[in-house]
Image: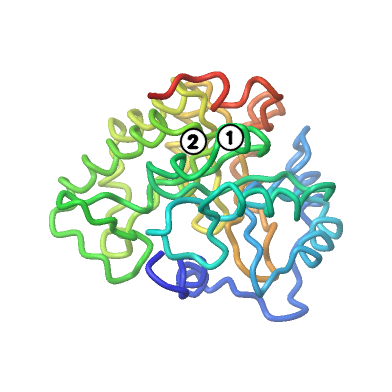
Amino acid sequence: MANTVSRREILARAAGVLALPGAALPQADSARRRGGLDFPLVDYHVHLDEAVTLDQALELSRERGVKFGIVEHAGTKENKYRGLLSNDEELKRYLARLAGKPVYTGIQAEGLDWMTCFSRQLVVQLDYVLTDALTFPEKDGRRVELWRPAVEIPDPQDFMERYVEFHVQVMAREPIDILANPTFLPARIEKDYDALWTPGRMQRIIQAAAKYGVAIEINSRYRLPRLPFLKMARRAGVKFSFGSNIHGLEVGNLDYGVEMAGELGLTAKDIFTPAAPGRKPIERRRFA
């Protein structure tokens, strides 16, 4: 979030998923049928940018049989995103732009302080709020952008304890629907994923998701969370959403989500759908 070369572009380059014009993508509806799923596919983690405009996204959604949930980054100006929503007027324009379109309308909330930017009356007009724990508060108060390849983690065990606790804070303190990019690790410690994500650490995040009614995103870009986490989450009764978080013409690729849904035997009752009016997190939960 530090400049116009944003999380979107950095992560896309790192994952090597920026598709060439005309690149083929397996039809997600076919993937759903192959997986024997009894629910329609929705990609709740779609960003619009120069690579995929709104018109292109609508066409891709129709072609692939996947409904899209469009999210724009939202929060204080400390978060340096092009298109960042940081006040009611900007959020109103965003809602108006998507009004009447066959998409769900959401935001990707940035920082624990994003609600200071918007009135409650506008937030309830969103279909959902998605966020993650990738903008991480360090001990000295700095916001560390964990997706950046150069991030140093001098003490991985200390980092993991604080990182898990931050996940819990995010779900406890914010009126969110979906926890995105779950169990993501910075590049320098990614190789130790299985050792660092102990059952106890996974369970703390899952318990918070269950307590606060937050859905866990099955993320196709990073192929996360891995199956042990997902099995624990299903046993806890947590609901799941699908998110590609892919920037470029492969947006809407939910193959990993379909694969995990088959492994877990997910059915419609396990899948997140936007809450009805009066039941959104900002309406049903109490916040200081």
| Pointer 2 with pointer 1, Cβ within 8 A | yes
Screen quadrant of the N terminus: bottom left
For disc 1, the neighbor class at 10 Å (few under 14, some 14 to 19, many from 20) is many
Identified at 83% across, 51% down, the residue is 65
Describe residue 20's horizontal placement relative to residue 175 as left or right. right
Where disc 1 sits, the SS reads: strand
Where residue 195 appears, x then y in whole percent?
A: 26, 46
Where residue 267 appears, x then y in whole percent?
A: 69, 28
Residue tagged 2: 230
At label 1, the amino acid type is Phe
Q: Is residue 192 above or below residue 56?
A: above
Q: How is the image coloured?
A: rainbow
Identified at 57% across, 29% down, the residue is 239
Residue tagged 1: 240
Q: Is residue 173 above or below residue 16?
A: above
For disc 2, the neighbor class at 10 Å (few under 14, some 14 to 19, many from 20) is many
At label 2, the amino acid type is Leu
